[in-house]
Amino acid sequence: MAWRENPKGKPVEWKVHDIAHVGNVEKPCFWDIDGDGASDVLIGTENSFIAHCLFW
């Protein structure tokens, strides 16, 4: 999972920032989990250690 940094009008590619290696992402969901007014990203996936994981 990664986010791309907006270059703010500069004619360059958006810089990629890796957040986590989560494997196959089926469906990202966006909710304000912690009540701070900003949407949080929730990702459901499967991996070899835990059958079903949730990344926040």
Image (cartoon, helix red, strand yellow):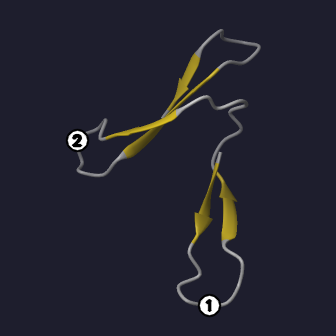
Residue kind at label 1, given as amino acid type: Lys
Query: Mark 1–mark 2 contact, CB under 8 Å?
Result: no
Residue at position x 24%, y 48% from top?
36
Asked if 5 appears above or below 33 in the picture, the reply is: below
Q: Reply above or below: 3 against 39.
A: below
Side of 8 relative to 24 (left or right): left
Residue at the spot x=71%, y=38% of the render? Answer: 21
Q: Position of residue 50 (x, y in %)?
A: 66, 11
Residue 37 left/right relative to 11: left
Quadrant of the frame with the N terminus: top right
Judged from the image, the secondary structure of the residue bearing numbered disc 1 is: loop
- Residue shown at the point (72%, 12%) measured from the top left: 49
Q: Residue 54 at what x, y percent from top left?
A: 53, 24
Q: Name the mark on residue 35.
A: 2
| Direction top: furthest residue | 51
Residue 15 placement: quadrant: bottom right
Question: Which is more foreground, mark 1 or mark 2?
Answer: 1
Q: Residues within 10 Å of mark 2 (few under 14, many from 20)?
A: few
Snapshot quadrant of residue 48: top right
Residue projecting furthest to the front: 27
Q: Few, some or many C-alpha atoms within 10 Å of disc 1 (few <14, some 14-19, many ≥20)?
A: few
Residue lying furthest bottom: 10
Question: Circle 2 — which element?
Answer: loop
Amino acid carrying label 2: it is Gly
C-alpha separation, residue under disc 1 versus residue under disc 2: 34 Å
In the foreground, 43 or 17: 43
Could you tell which of marks 1 and 2 lies nearer the N-terminus?
Answer: 1
Q: Which residue is mark 1?
A: 10
